Image (cartoon, rainbow, N blue to C red):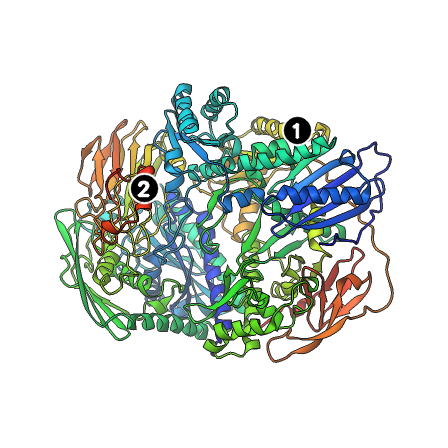
Amino acid sequence: MAYDPITLGILWNRLISITDEIVASLVRTSFSTVVRESYDLSCVLLDARGHSLAQGSWSGTAFVGTIPKTVRHLLKRFPPETLKPGDVLATNDPWLGTGHLFDITVTRPVFRKSRLLGFTTTVTHLPDIGGRGFSSNAREVYEEGLRLVPCKLYDRGKPVAAMFELIRSNVRVADQVIGDINANITANELGSARLLTFMDEYGIEDLSSLSDSILSHSEQAMRAEIAKIPPGTYTNTVMAEGVDGDITIACRIDVSGDRISIDYAGSSPQSSFAINTPFCYTYAFTAYALKCLTIPDIPNNEGAFRPVVASAPTGSILNPTFPAATGGRHALGHFVPTAIFGALQSVLPERVLADPGLINLIRFYGRNLQGERFSTVYFASGGMGAHAHGDGLTATPAPSNICSTPVEIFETLTGILVSRRAIRPDSGGRGRHRGGHGQEIQFVNATDHPVSLSLFANRTRFAARGFQGGCDGAPRLVLLNGQPVDPKSQQELAPGETVDFAEAGGGGFGPPEGRDPSVIARDERGAMVKAGTV
Amino acid sequence: MQPFKRSWVPTSPGRGQPRPTWRLGIDIGGTFTDFVFIDTRTGKIHTEKRLTTADDPARSVFEGINTLLEATGATVADISTFVHGTTLAINAVIERKGARTGLLTTMGFSDTIELGRETRYDLYDLKLRFPVPLVGRQLRKEVKERIGPRGDVLTPIDPDDVLEHTRALVEQDRIESLAVCFLHSYLNPEHERAAKQAIARTFPDLPVSISSEVTPSVREYERTSTVVVNAYVQPVVAGYLGRIESWLATRGLRGSFLLMTSSGGTISSATARALPVRLLESGPVAGMQMASLLASLRSDRNVLAFDMGGTTSKGYVVVAGEAEKTYQWEIARVHEFKVGSGLPIQSPAMKLVEIGSGGGSIAAIDRRGVLQVGPRSSGASPGPACYGSGGVAPTITDANVLLGFLGAESFLGGRMRLQTERAAGAIDEALGKPLGLGTLEAAWGIHEMANEDISRAFRIHAAERGIDVGGFTMIAFGGAGPLHAVRVAQKLRMRRVVVPLRAGVFSALGLLTAPIAFDVASTRRTYVSALTTEEIARHFTPLEDVAMQFVLKTGLPRGQVKISRELEVRYFGQGHEVVVKLPRRAGVTPEMIASLFHKAYQRTYQTTIKLDYELEVMNWRVELVGPNPRIELRQEQHESGDPVAKGTRLAHFNGPGRGVRAMVFDRSQLHVGQTVSGPAIVEEVESSLVIPPGHAAVVDPWLNLVIDLDQASGQHGV
């Protein structure tokens, strides 16, 4: 059955609204600040074949790219014909899931009577998964915690008690972890009820033809945009800080007609520390970058992945092999869109974004003022890169998307005090359009116990680069009691001690001489830049 | 503008009251200002409608009052109650016409208002925008003080430090209003209060808003945003209210002057001047009050109010006579109504859903190659293509003209002729040709897409509360509401559509039915299991005292105030709560709270999961409400005979190509008990009701048009 453009729009929007409702439920029923305040989550609807159809308007950047593949992995282990109504499947395997153990992918097959109609799937970042805890410093995945290969959490509507006991007994802050897993299950339960209502209402027996229409619309739109890029080969190399040496990320982009392929040959070999980026994550950020450049305004679905061919050498930092440690995979994976934007800046200057200052994940583990254990991640954003039409946004996450935890909530949960959270003036790279400023944030351990701190900071030596003549942003600083420390390390913060972060600024766009004087005056008035500089 | 002629007579006129005896309701909307004036001795209702004088809204208010006084022979001294609803506060924010405002914060946190929550509301749009903060960086100062997460003082406040910053802001930066927000002030307001007192002594004329008075709730960005909005609109609102008050005072007002709040109660003008943030949604709420009034008159307990205007549609659900409130919302979105692109507000408001589908919403083919309607709008200028004022983009109104739902000759009572050919041209150009569709096909697509978008938004809105509006009654109003009402109601499987006569006037009447009310909340974390009945009472008492002070300012006697208590409860460790309404009787136990929580949680999230976790109370909330003013409208006399049509018109009720000849009626000529059978269109000045074939509208005793829907026909294809 073919859908006319009007009907298709109506049905398509409705599917998106179902995913939005799943996200709302997930946020409101979750326990960890990582999910409920920081929105480190995603939600996707898939058809019975495992093709993604729609995603929540609020969704993590990478997860929407990994979910369809994860669901297919789950279906390999639990073939569709063996699934029953009320089953819930899950995995956190880094290679099958999102690249590290901390994210759990939870999927629920949706049935009408005995017929499988599709899947609703959510991912959330768990507050803990056991092992040595979230850090860059593990040497093998075994150290990083509990790996759940594809498994069933619910079997025909009943919890698989052994799985819940296994998880509960292997993690810190077990109530939060189990609570968050239940939030995933609740949200998918709601989502499948909504999908059924939708299909009943419109008399849709099977999602395949709707799915085909949506996916082919997106695919064609994306191919049409790719075809507008001048054919050719575009390359770029970006550098990033590793744990025991610098990392190179090299990309080569081949554009030919409506096809585009990206290869990461020339990138560093896999690391012996936990900064390896499994290919599922590399691919997700590759597809994300290309979607931003081609069809940013079309709702995302699998159609936007089809035109994207990507490869990375096996055993490289962007395609490591088991049992590489991957906990801090974001610390390098976030450079993937940057590498692609840089490669294409000469042919798509109107569309790219100069390098972002990137987000800083800071994991705190300790005991709060009540003596209760906490394990949480604070997300602090650097500045976004500038673009051809405007300044970069101050302290805004890119390319991943997250939300900061309110200081009042963070302090209440941890007993750690935030003594300052302020715009970092002059940190955005100068340019015709200035890069977004980073921020300065200081934490004081105001508890009676030591706090363990895991650092994943990047852009400490390799600043966000300006594009088209724009200047680089200020690099990131990490200071323990006022002294610089290894930005990818585990540290202990004794009671009364402080840790300071000066988050990186985004890159500028265009030569600084071209900046509008009235905008400079505004920046100076707000002390955003030093007077007299451009 | 002719004053509105029709009048009602209440069945039970107020008897024997000493003067003053008149009640006045005035609702200022974007286009019209509506007035109702009731003589409670005779029960007679007088109305007036004027164009809003946007440059100075007080002018149309004074003119309208004078007109009514002349017509009735009453004087200002005869007015017992004047209730006012106004969009003044929200417009000051949207148009950035508020006061030059300063902000004092905790040391280290003056940028909170600009850093926000560090999130992108659109994942793929790299050029997204955020609102510029209402207070620029140079007007934000940091004070040496700190309260800890348990409410303990870590660094004491120094009043001299506060004064030094304030002096700089006043003398160098010429601020006209000041906001203060310190960390954890929701737990311990002492520092904010100390700052306010110090400032009041030295700068007695500077308006100061402190966050612990405006919204004592956790989350510093949202709280700062709210107190800043309060300070930003405060001088504007105070100036306006002051003018009205002195105008009334010089004319001998003896009665009370009350303002409609976002949450559907009324407050004294003194309270409104201190807390103008409470007035932000005052405008739409009047319409929703009207819907609640109608529902109670008609004994419809479950209602969806549907207000479709020129730029947006709003919806509001009442279940079993109870409306829901929200305490966290957003205003003045800067990017296509996208959630996250506005300024967050923590303040009680009726829970409305608003989407960018209004008569002026523009239809276009989006990048997917599919039709999209809104949220971009042609606004009042240039307006829809058919207005002939230069608009070239096709809008919902253009589609409705082509489909025959709006009369080209009778729009706005014939004051504006709609240009059908321009509507057709715009639709062909933007949609018909590129999509290979005929004009009517494309017009139908626009109409139907709007219906779908609206019903989708309403469905989600209701579903978030665990409600299905199937079987509810829709009350439809606004310029475009009655055009879309039946189709939207069908999609939602609703039971009935009610279209009030001259909804604008009813909005003003809705003002007069709102009780005096005030609610306050505070954040106080505690385990449910750790509470005792006595402690519960002890937590609520100070809140009730604060709210009572505000309520008593209206002149209402204490004995007439009803107090209701609510807790916001969650599983320990969660970040979001569900509302638990406590029973009125004394002796609430923790077990009672737990049981109410589990029920509310399972209903809200439609889940069977019940966790064995501690329960935690987060927010304590009390609402004080005065008696509901009674307005009993007389039921009009039943008249026999069939209604007389004023003409016929070709209209397309069921898609393109299947046009049928519809009877066209003039609403003012319809009488109680008469039935209008579809296909028909009933026209009035501001709107037209579309009655599809197979349906019929009956005029009820209050002159509403009522269409009962066959629920079996709720099933629909697309």
In the rendered image, residue B716, in percent from the top left (x then y), is placed at 60, 71
Q: Is residue B523 left or right of residue B249?
A: left
Examine the rendered structure and indicate whether residue A254 appears above or below residue B328. below
Q: Label 1 crowding class (10 Å Cα cut-off): few <14, some 14-19, many 20+?
A: some
Mark 2 chain: A
x 46%, y 35%: residue? B101
As measured in the structure, the alpha-carbon distance from the residue carrying label 1 to the one carrying label 2 is: 47 Å
Front residue of this view, candidates A48 and B304? B304
Q: Amino acid at mark 2?
A: Ala
Q: Quadrant of the C terminus of chain A?
A: top left
Residue that label 1 marks:
B553
Which structural element holds mark 2? helix
Disc 2 target residue:
A521
On the question of residue B166 being in view, the answer is yes
Number of the label disc, if any, that sits on residue A223: none
Q: Nearer the viewer, residue B678 or A91?
A: B678
Q: Quadrant of residue A372?
A: top left
Q: How many marks?
A: 2
